[in-house]
Structure formats: C-alpha cells, structure tokens
Amino acid sequence: MELKALTYLIVGASFALYIAIAFWSRARSTGDFYIAGKTVSPVANGMATAADWMSAASFISMAGLIAFLGYDASVYLMGWTGGYVLLALFLAPYLRKFGRFTVPEFIGERYYSKAARIVAVVCLIFISFTYVAGQMRGVGIVFSRFLEVDVTVGLVVGMGVVLIYAVLGGMKGITYTQVAQYCVLIFAYTVPAVFIAIQVTGNPVPQLAFGGDIAGSDVSLLAKLDETVTALGFGSYTAGTKSTIDVFCITLALMVGTAGLPHVIVRFFTVPKVRDARTSAGYALLFIAILYTTAPAVGAMARYNLMNTIQPGEIGAPHGNLLAEERPNWMRRWEATGLVAFEDRNDDGRIQYYNDQNASFAEVAARYGWEGNELTVDQDIMVLANPEIADLPNWVIALVAAGGIAAALSTAAGLLLVISAAASHDLIKGIFLPGISEKGELRAGRIAAVFAILIAGYLGFDPPGWVAQVVAFAFGLAAASLFPAILLGIFSKRVNKQGAIAGMLVGLLFTYGYIEWFKGLFLKWAGAPWGENVPAEWLFGISPEGIGVVGMLLNFAVATGISYVTAPPPQGIQALVDRIRVPRAIEEH
Amino acid sequence: MTPERRRAYWRANLRLVAACLLAWFVGSYGLGIVFVEELNRIRLGGFKLGFWFAQQGSIYLFVLLIFFYAWRMNRLDRQYGAHED
C-alpha cells in the first residue's frame, strides 16, 4: 500500500482506539475526573506516567539532540530519569497518603493558607501552559511531516481528539488512553532501533550495540565515531564541552524539576494504596528507561550512519565524499521538508559535511579544497528518517508517525487535566464557590478543560517567544517553587505558612528573573534579555538551564529561616504531617 | 501505633532514604559527571566507563534503586505495623 494511505490508516486506527477507550472509561464523579477514582494498578499507572512524561520532544528530538551533542546530552538522559528517584523517595507515597485531588490542595492544606494555595496554582499554570504549548506545536508538526497537511490542520485535529477523551473521560479516560499510547510509542521507537542496531553492529539489542563493534570489523562504534567526528573538526563524541559545575547544575535542575512537575506528581494520586505509589514509580521509570536507554544508542548509530553516508572514502581524498547525484532517497525526500539541506559551495559535485565553525580546522579544510560545510541536518531527522535509512517497510514509517502523535497527545492531555483541575477544584471549589455541588464541580472541570485546550491550541498555533525556553523555564520553576514547598511540608513539621509562601515566591522570582535576564521571556518588548548569555557573565558559571538549583536552595533557606523566627504551625497541622508519614490510618488520640 | 513506635518507624525510613539518596548521587553525579574523565580511562566493552555511566548505567541504577526502596519500605511497614489493611 502507498505510504500516505497506510499512515492515514494507522494514525486513524490509533485515534479510534483512544476515543473508544475514553467512552468505555468516562468519568462519573469528581474522583474519577481528577484521580481516576484511585483504582489504577501500579503497572498501568507506570505506563500512563511514562506516556504522560515522554513528550513529542523525547520521541522525535532527543535521539537527534544526543547525536549532535554526544556526552553533553547526558544532562538530559540523567536529568529526565533521576527525578523519579526523588519522587519515589520524597513525594509520591506521602502525597498519595494525603489522598486528595491536586498539588495546590496539598500546599494549601499543609500551610493552612489560601494564599499558599493560590501561589501554587500560579506556579502550576505557568509550568503547565509553557509545557503544553510545545506539545500542541509538536502535534501539528508531526501531522504536517507525515500526513503532508498544514501545521494548523494538524493542530486542530489533535485538539479535537484530546478534547473528546480528556473532557469525557477526565483522569480516568486519560489514564487508560495513555496506557495504549505508551504501547504504541514504545513499539514505534524500538522497532527501527533494533533494525538499525543489527545493520550497524550485528547485535539486535540497541543498548548493547551502542557499546559493540561495527559489523565486520573489530573497531567499536564509539571509537570509530570519535575518530571520524574529530577528523572533521567536530568535538569528540564521548567527551563534553560544558564546565563540570554547569553539567552538575543542569542535571540537578532537570531532576528536581521533574519531581516537581504537577502533571507527573498527580499520576501517583490515582493508585489504590501508598505501597502502590512506591512500586508504581519504579514501573514508571522502568518503562521510561526502555526509551531513554535506547535513545543514546539510536543517536550514536544515526550519527555514524550519517557520517558514513556522506564520507564513504578517506577524509580529504579527492573522491572521499559522497557524489551529490548518488545521495540516497531518504535525503531527497526529507529535503522537501527543509529538514535536510544541501548546497554545493565548492562546485565539486560532492557533499562535504564538517565543522566550519572550528577555526583550527579551517586550514585543513582549505587544503582539502573545501569551502564551507555543505549539508545542514535538523536533529529531528535522526528519528523521523531512521526507518527509511534502515530500509524498513512502509508500515514501520506509518507506525513512527502514530508513535510521535501518541507521545505528543498523551503529554498534552496530562497537562490539560492538571490545568483544568487547578481551575475547577483549587480556584472554583476551593476559593470562589466552596458550596458548589459535586455535579457542578464536574461540569466546571469539563468546561475548564475545554478552555485549557483552546488556550493551548492558540499557544501552539502562534507560539509566543517564551515557549522556546520551555526547558529552562518549566523545569527551573518547578524545581525552585513547588518541589521545596512539598518536600518541606512532609519532612518538616516546623515550616509554617509564612516560610513556605516566602520561600516559593523567592525561588520563583529569582529563577524567573535570571532566565529573563539572560534569555528573555515576557519582557522582550522592554529590551530583555539584558545580559549576554555566556559563561563569563553567569552567576557561579551556572547557565539559565541550571539556575533552578540556586532558586531551590534559596527557597529552602528562606522557608526554613523565616519559619524559625515565626510561630510554629498549629497542632492540627503537625498531626496532619504525622498522618501522611505513616501508610496505615492513625487512630486519633 | 504508639507515638514512640511511629518515631522509630520514621527514623528507619529516613536512614533508608539517606542510603538510597547517596547511591543515587554517587551513581549519577559522581561516576557520570565529576569523575567522568578518570573513569573514561577504563573500558567496559566498547564503552568508556564514565560515558557509559552518564548515558546508560545511571538510568539502570535509578530503576533498581526505586524498586529496592519500595521493597525495603514495604517490609519496614509490616515490621512496624504501619502497613495499610
């Protein structure tokens, strides 16, 4: 069957599946709508969390990012997995014991303050909207690349599908849809990876092929890759370029940020018991690790394939480079999308791909008769074109499209749900209309979900500049505001309302201000960024991506400092902390 | 559960958390970042060891750590009579 028809068929079938699941598991109460009635098994919740967590960026962009960054990309691999250890050790079981619906609800109750709850809602909304705009954009891009429709059309179709299953099913519908989406996306990711691993090294397991020898030789993949890229003026693949302190802080900010993301935390509210919350965190990370340990293997093999394709002969030899006329079909096909571009600068009819920004390599390049790099490759191509590079059948290409869309939709739905829950449960029920009936609140939740989807769609359609800074901003904010407030709320009985609110505000404002100063977020109209974004200007040499760590430390210091000079929390709150620390219900004395 | 027993349970939990956190820190920040260059002189198959920890080993360790913590905690719950149902 023709590729396009096949892609429509497989993507269409996956949509039908998601909507059918939503009908089967539609929400009948607020408990269903917010936390799936606390009936999700730990394994199912693990899969749902993995799909919730792994976004379009994880699926499409990460392997390519690793392919071009090499060791430097380790910050993302460790940073986006290690946070689950913090979640399991510090947050998930206790918040599950607390047993309510939302993250701001915990903060409001533990710090006996509506103001604290509102600060938490503001943090949550900033974090989640920043994140969801990127997902909606991702849905549009995946559609346009695979189905050859306009980005806007893709965006609207994606919004429609999410609208049906999130509004109808709430958390319950989203959970079981995410389980299905995880299966689709992990299958779509690993199948091409296995075939490429066999092609490059002869070993079918990507994680082992990564450290294996190139097929038919006794040179390891990574050694060969290091040799080739450095001979072309690029940095060594297995060595880093960033300073140790910056790598350290970025990794920590991503880990703590992960543990502080509301749409991830809330997934652990849906399991029946405290012990399920603990094991479920393990399953979640196991399912995530399948993709996260495959991605660096795919990245290295894809980079090797690319280098090998462009440079089949000796580097610098007159016939060492690929003849443009003989370039493979996948390259021609993806040139149409602009993801691959070729320009013959020295008119030799061959393609040269090297680092022309490296001053010390310029002399060598000139000796070879090269007049600049002739090939530009978008990082996304590494996953998108993989099935074609490996000569896999059309159904695999169609499956990768369905997988990319599944990754984007599942994350978007999870984010939209926490936004609508914050609006209907924390703001409407918690603050403005405490007397609202359960039926009324459920309706409010559904209406809030519709509005959230419309706003997210608009942000995806016309992304404001700050969306591009999603990594630094969403993770820095979560690390500096929500994570310390929740952690202190569980592990300290002494931290009080004044401390928590001041801590969150200081963490939030410091982190936001630093990112605004160096990267520019909302104040571009006023001339931001004001600082030059280079290591010499950074505080302690920490980049805006890693500054959430300093924000977090400030939050901890301010919250504990202020708490110790003000009155301790009331008795009832200390009893609450005692209750959430123990899984068994404590009889009142 | 008496308040004393609850305090003992909490202290045992904190000790376990501290041990897991230490392993988490050493496995990722220690072996994958701070001492990466020293470890890269050692080979693990086709990998440099520090690089392997940064892109593979640390992730495996995280998964094992969570399951280990969950297993030990569930045992601790029963030991102290803190388990549900």
Image: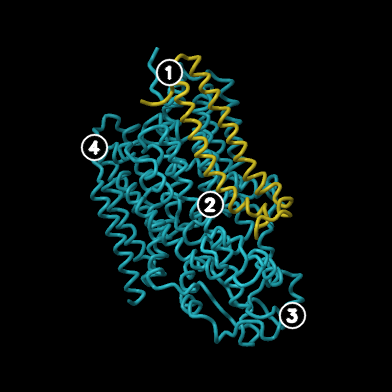
Q: What residue type is labelled 3?
A: Ala
Tell me, yes or no, whether the two marked residues, 1 and 2, touch with CB atoms within 8 Å.
no
Q: Which chain is disc 1 placed on?
A: A
Name the residue tied to disc 1: A572
What secondary structure is found at the residue carrying circle 2? helix
Tell which circle, 4 or 3, labels the residue nearer the N-terminal end. 3
The residue pinned by badge 2 equals A471
In which quadrant of the rendered image does the N terminus of chain A lie?
bottom left
For the C terminus of chain A, which image quadrant? top left
Q: How far apart are marks 1 and 2 (CA)?
A: 39 Å
SS class, disc 4: helix
- Tell me the shade of chain B: yellow
User: How far apart, in angstroms, are the residues tagged by discs 4 and 2?
Assistant: 36 Å
Q: Earlier in the sequence, mark 1 or mark 4?
A: 4
- Please tell me which residue lies in front, A240 or A464: A240
- Check the residue under mark 4 and report the chain it is in: A
Q: Name the residue under label 4.
A: A440
What scheme was used to colour the molecule?
by chain
Q: Where is residue A211 in the image (x, y as percent from the top left)?
A: 61, 60
Residue shown at the point (33%, 64%) measured from the top left:
A11
Which is nearer the N-term, disc 3 or disc 2?
Answer: 3
**Residue at 51% of width from left, 77% of height from top?**
A331
Q: Give the residue at mark 3.
A: A366
Per the model, the C-alpha gap separating discs 4 and 3 is 73 Å
10 Å crowding of disc 3: few (<14), some (14-19), many (20+): few
Residue A571 lies left or right of residue A169; in this view the side is right
Tags 1 and 3 on a common chain: yes
Considering only order in the chain, which callout, 2 or 1, is on the residue closer to the N terminus? 2
The part of the image, by quadrant, that contains residue A513 is top right
